[in-house]
């Protein structure tokens, strides 16, 4: 069974692959305060927000997001997951309607928790994707997809015919 073979490491990015295997999920949960009710997390999130909104204009741009993950959250694995950061930003920036002129283009404070939740989720997808993309070329072909059936099913549920699902 191809699925039981250890995934091949890309000769181009050995460091990245090694790093991504060492994701400390418990640490990540501690550093991403997403709780709606826990006072400690709410406080931590408010402090994060101040750190993220570097110029204090009430909006967080993609650049500020990346800087915040590097300097405030300080999780290397997360900072390296650029596609996950980008997608979480895109998702959160216009998640809540508002009257402000630039609201739809930037993350506002009211959207910050949504951003952190989205970031965690996109990061999990990103890690799953990296495990599936055994060729390391940034794409998933049908063979990798079938070989990674078990991982994919964790996200989307049982597949009757993986080859058909891929198309
Ligand atoms: Ca700002
Ligand atoms: Ca917004």
Image: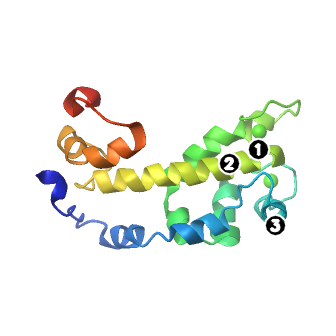
> What is the x, y in percent for residue 154?
38, 46
> What is the x, y in percent for residue 76?
53, 71
Would residue 70 appear left or right of 134 to someone viewing this image? Answer: right
Check disc 1 and report its element: helix, strand or loop. Answer: helix
Determine which quarter of the picture holds residue 98.
Answer: top right
**Separation of residues labelled 1 and 2 (CA atoms):** 6 Å
Residue tagged 3: 40
Residue at 89% x, 30% y: name it.
Answer: 99
Check disc 2 and report its element: helix, strand or loop. Answer: helix
Characterize the local packing of mark 1: few (<14), some (14-19) or many (20 or more) Cα atoms within 10 angstroms: many
> What is the x, y in percent for residue 138?
32, 49
**Separation of residues labelled 1 and 3 (CA atoms):** 18 Å
Q: How is the image coloured?
A: rainbow
Q: Is mark 2 within 8 Å of ligand 2?
A: no
Q: Quadrant of the C terminus?
A: top left
Q: Is residue 144 above or below residue 158?
A: below
Q: Is mark 1 within 8 Å of ligand 2?
A: yes
Check disc 3 and report its element: helix, strand or loop. Answer: helix
Kindly indicate whether the residue at mark 2 contacts the one at mark 3 (C-beta within 8 angstroms). Answer: no
Would residue 133 appear left or right of 110 to someone viewing this image? Answer: left
Residue tagged 1: 111
> What is the x, y in percent for residue 30?
65, 68
Kindly indicate whether the residue at mark 2 contacts the one at mark 1 (C-beta within 8 angstroms). Answer: yes
Residue tagged 2: 115
């Amino acid at each position: 069974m191809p699925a039981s073979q250890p995934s091949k490491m890309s000769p181009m990015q050995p460091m990245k692959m090694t790093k991504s295997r060492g994701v400390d999920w418990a640490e990540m949960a501690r550093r991403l305060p997403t709780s709606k009710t826990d006072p400690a997390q709410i406080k931590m999130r408010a402090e994060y927000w101040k750190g993220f909104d570097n110029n204090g204009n009430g909006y967080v741009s993609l650049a500020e997001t990346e800087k915040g993950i590097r300097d405030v959250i300080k999780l290397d694995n997360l900072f390296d997951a650029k596609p996950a950061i980008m997608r979480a930003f895109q998702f959160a920036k216009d998640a809540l309607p508002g009257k402000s002129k630039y609201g739809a283009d930037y993350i506002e404070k009211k959207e910050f928790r949504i951003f952190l939740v989205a970031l965690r989720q996109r990061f999990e997808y990103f890690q799953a994707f990296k495990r599936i993309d055994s060729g390391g070329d940034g794409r998933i072909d049908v063979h990798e997809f079938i070989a990674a059936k078990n991982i994919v099913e964790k996200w989307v549920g049982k597949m009757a015919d993986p080859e058909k699902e891929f198309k």
